[in-house]
Image (spheres, rainbow, N blue to C red):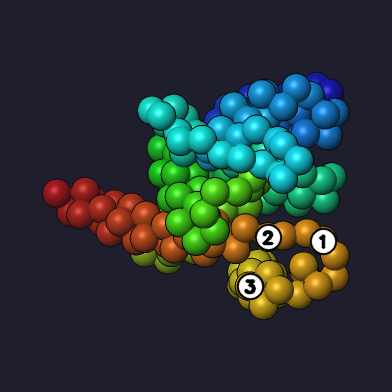
Amino acid sequence: MGDLLAALRPVPVTAGLLLLSIVGFFLVYLNMPLRWVSGLTYLPFNLGRAGPSFTPMNGEYWRLVTPVFLHFSWLHIVFNALWTWEFGHRIERTLGSRWLLLLFLAIAVISNSSQFAAGGPSIFGGMSGVVYGLLGFSWVAARLQPRWQFAPPPGLMLFMIGWLLICLFGVIEVLGFGAVANAAHVGGLLAGGVLGAIAGYASHRVGKA
């Protein structure tokens, strides 16, 4: 436990994202009151005989972010927690906690909104849109600014993009792993890439000023 706390202490934002993701998973896994889960979804919902019915957001703008903390299976939370740590702590150690927090918020909003725009009212969640955003940011930013030593290895990049393509072609759903929030993945990846380009370019401009 001491070694774990020592590893997490320098990266409080990454640690917080992991903790909130675990809490969101157990809300679902332990069948906690429905209103608790509904408080984190993109739109509030109730369950009836015909399935979920949704109501407008009505100014509850935290919902633009909070679906990322909901996870619906052990595979879902373990996969996302591993990649959140892998990308998050490297960025946070290099750029600082404030920048990782801002990056997370921007990607979360874009990835969740992309999924809602593509799929309409539904119950979706998971940190994977943010994970793909951090992947895109790491890949682009570190190539524009070589001092930032957090670029993912080419093999890992190929694996993540390959997994994204497998999901896009519906292979995961055919194998019985459930629906995948593909729009969130694509939206997060593109958002992260754009933000990485902005950050990398801006770092050069600041350096020349």
| Residue shown at the point (83%, 34%) measured from the top left | 29
Residue 168 is tagged as 3
Q: Which residue is mark 1?
A: 177
Q: Earlier in the sequence, mark 3 or mark 2?
A: 3
Query: Please, is residue 204 above or below residue 93 in the view?
Result: below
**Which residue occupies the foreground of this view, 154 or 209?**
154
Q: Where residue 34 sits: x, y (%)?
A: 72, 27
Residue 140, quarter of the rendered image: bottom left
Residue 193, quarter of the rendered image: bottom left
The three-letter amino acid code for the residue at tag 2 is Val
Q: Is residue 189 shown to the viewer in this render? A: no
Residue 102, quarter of the rendered image: top left
Residue 180 is tagged as 2
The three-letter amino acid code for the residue at tag 3 is Leu
Contact between labelled residues 2 and 1, with CB atoms less than 8 Å apart: yes
Quadrant of the rendering where the N terminus is positioned = top right
